Image (tube, rainbow, N blue to C red):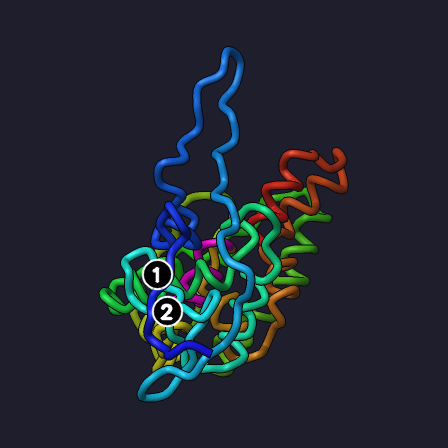
Amino acid sequence: MSEPGKDTGPKGGRLADIGAGDDEGAKPRVAPEKLDAPKLPKRFYANAAIAPAEGGGYLVQLDGRSLRTPSKAVLAVPDEAIAAAIVAEWAGQGEVIDPGSMPVTRLVNSALDGVSREPEATRAEILRYAGSDLLCYRADGPAKLDALQDEFWSPLIGWMQERFHARFVLAQGIVHVEQFPETIEAVDVALGDLDILRLAALNTITTLTGSAILAVAVLHRRLTAEEAWAAAHVDEDYQIGLWGEDEEASVRRAGRW
């Protein structure tokens, strides 16, 4: 095994542009009727493996050279299980490298290159969602949708008040309702002292679901990720039950998951 710390990149290319979802230099071309899909970079390595990092933690190495983030920082994580998940993503690539199939790599890149530089701004974004949380805005009918929202969401509203003293104000429709400052402070306390990876993960859950409450519920194991995802799509699943599933919407939802 090569020494940890050596960086790697594709022969004739740049690894820094891979993994965070930004494939620079591979922009879609304009076709007569539609845009072509971005060209994906070819796989340039044979093996992906874990290696110890100096000072603790774990590196991901491709053919013995350490993986780097888009900002060229050495990609090092504190947990071997996380490193193993990243290795599995890189080992699982075929002839081309598809960043869309590498969510753990992308999340760690985001944490190291973005969240680590502005952790307070990332935390503040989660708290902004708490001020207009999905679970606080209820439909004004039909009765079946009202019942579904109450079934999935009301126990979580009650749990937030009982566990963290976060009392949320509910509303019908889309008119904004102001939450108590004490409620937002209680959500902040519920988030606790987060490391960079957990903060990045919670921010991702919050923005994808529209709910800080669901992110807190996953953090404290009140919900599994699958349960939180189902709760975030109560309205959408109700519409699917009425009108059937739209194939393009299903593909987008699967990609977001």
Name the foreground residue: 233 vs 158: 233
Dot 1 lies on which element?
loop
Q: Main secondary structure of the magenta part?
A: helix
Quarter-wise, where is residue 168 in the image?
Answer: bottom left
User: Is residue 165 visible from the viewing direction of this image?
Assistant: no
Q: Which residue position holds label 2?
A: 75
Q: Residues within 10 Å of mark 2 (few under 14, many from 20)?
A: many
Image quarter in which the C terminus is found: bottom right
| Mark 2 and mark 1: Cα distance apart in space | 6 Å
- x%, y% of residue 167? 43, 71
Residue 59: give its label: none
Q: Residue at x 40, y 72 (%)?
A: 197
Residue 70 versus residue 192 in the image, above or below = above
Name the foreground residue: 110 vs 42: 42
Residue 111 versus residue 255 in the image, above or below = below
Q: Which residue position holds label 1?
A: 69
- x%, y% of residue 94? 61, 50
Cβ atoms under marks 2 and 1 closer than 8 Å: yes
Dot 2 lies on which element?
loop
> Does the stretch in magenta take in 205?
yes
Extent of the magenta region:
200-208
Q: Residue at x 65, y 51 (%)?
A: 146
> Does the stretch in magenta take in 195?
no
- x%, y% of residue 244? 76, 36
Residue that lies at the very extreme toward the top in this rendered image? 32
Indicate the amino acid at tag 2. Leu
7 relative position to 202: left or right: left
User: Is residue 183 visible from the viewing direction of this image?
Assistant: yes
Indicate the amino acid at tag 1. Thr
Residue that lies at the very extreme toward the bottom in this rendered image? 55
- x%, y% of residue 35? 49, 23
Name the foreground residue: 20 vs 124: 20
